[in-house]
Image (cartoon, grey):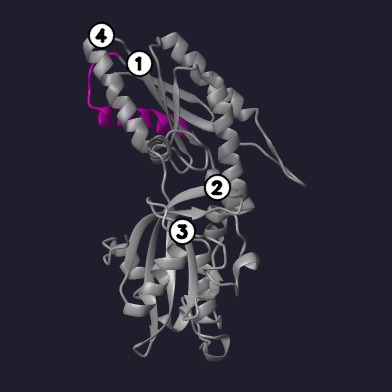
Amino acid sequence: MYNHHVSNPSYKNMYSISVDFLQASPQCCSRQKVRGWEHMDKNAIYREILQFIKEGVYFVDTSRKITFWNNYAEEITGFSAAEVLDSHCYDNILNHVDEAGTQLCKTECPLHKTMDDGLKREASVYLHHKKGHRVPVVVRTFPTSDKGKIIGAIELFTEKKRPSELQHDIEELKVLAMTDQLTGLSNRRYTENFLSSKLVELEKFQVPFAVAMVDIDYFKAVNDTFGHDIGDQVIQMTTRSMTNAVGAEDLVSRWGGEEFLVVFSPIGSKNLEQVSERIRMLVESSSLQLDTTTIQVTVSIGAVIVDKPVPKETIIHMADLLMYQSKQKGRNCISLGRM
């Protein structure tokens, strides 16, 4: 059965918004400047926002006629707005049933009850998809009122996921939290953790490794001349050349802006010089072809071999100093060190 309590504060905040923009007719909507959206209808702005939230949302009036249906409602149910607007929620559309198989839309309609008593409700039900199958969802209903009078109701519904699907989503979120969105490389947060694990290996098994700081030369000039969109493409081009220059066990990460940090698996001085030079050469020989010009960049590299346990901050600082040494030598070169 439906209960009369909604504990999630986000829904409370969402529905503290006045019904003036949720249910008002176009004739009574005020026109004003809203957060820089000059002269746009305030109701239209909020309805546009509701179109893109990741939850099914629909409004009904007191006759239970559907007056709003957002994009995510279509994604969950298969029914488009054109198919449901101006029909009634009991017109063989969602046909909610509970665990016992009770047809809620006919005998226990939550929207109807919410309009009767003004109470919010929440429950787990199964809705009817356009293709015929049942979909488990959590539904929440809220009354809408104008000057103290209930004039309709709102239902939100979210698809319930199986534990395996939830676990998959959690794993995807973990990956996103550790990934740079522009390049697909590991981000700074992940790299710091990875570097800590390499230090543990070094202390336990005496396995040396190396770290290189790589910075794109004169990158500000690229952004100033061609714009940030082209600058992003240059970063992506540089990323691909760098990852193609290193081994499968090496980590190339975006440290910030046009800076990258590379953590190499067990490696000696000679090999470190070779792979650093390969990175420099491949970036230098890469090019981004535009309509009227070709963009090429170079990188300055500072690389340090770590063969004794030291704080990771010290390693990064040393690699950074060596990278700036390369800048001072004229850029497009490498500087090597050892800790």
Q: Residues within 10 Å of mark 3 (few under 14, many from 20)?
A: many
Q: Give the extent of the magenta segment.
A: 307-328
The Cα atoms of the two marked residues, 2 and 1, are separated by 56 Å
Q: Nearer the viewer, mark 3 or mark 1?
A: 3
What is the secondary structure assignment of the residue under circle 2?
A: loop
The numbered mark, 2 or 1, whose residue comes first in the sequence reads 2
The residue pinned by badge 3 equals 96
Secondary element type, mark 4: helix
Residue located 56% across and 53% down the image: 129
- Judge left or right: residue 302 versus residue 280: left
Task: Write the residue at 65% across / 27% down.
Answer: 285
The residue singled out by tag 2 in the image is 133
Q: Give the spatial CA distance, label 3 vs label 4.
A: 61 Å
Provide residue 130's location: percent of width, then percent of height.
60, 54
Query: Front-most of 89 and 52?
Result: 89
User: Residues at badges 1 and 4 in contact (C-beta under 8 Å)?
Assistant: no
Is residue 326 toward the left or the right of residue 190 in the image? right
Image quadrant in which you'd find residue 332? top right
The answer to whether the residues at label 2 and label 1 have Cβ atoms under 8 Å apart is: no
Which of the two discs, 2 and 4, labels the residue nearer the N terminus? 2
Label 1 belongs to which residue? 209
Residue 87 vertical placement versus 150 (above, below): above
* Front in this rendered view, residue 63 or 232: 63
Horizontal arrangement in the rendering, residue 320 relative to residue 309 (left or right): right
Kind of residue at disc 2: His
Residue 269 placement: quadrant: top left
Binning the other alpha carbons within 10 Å of mark 2 as few (below 14), some (14 to 19) or many (20 upward) gives: few
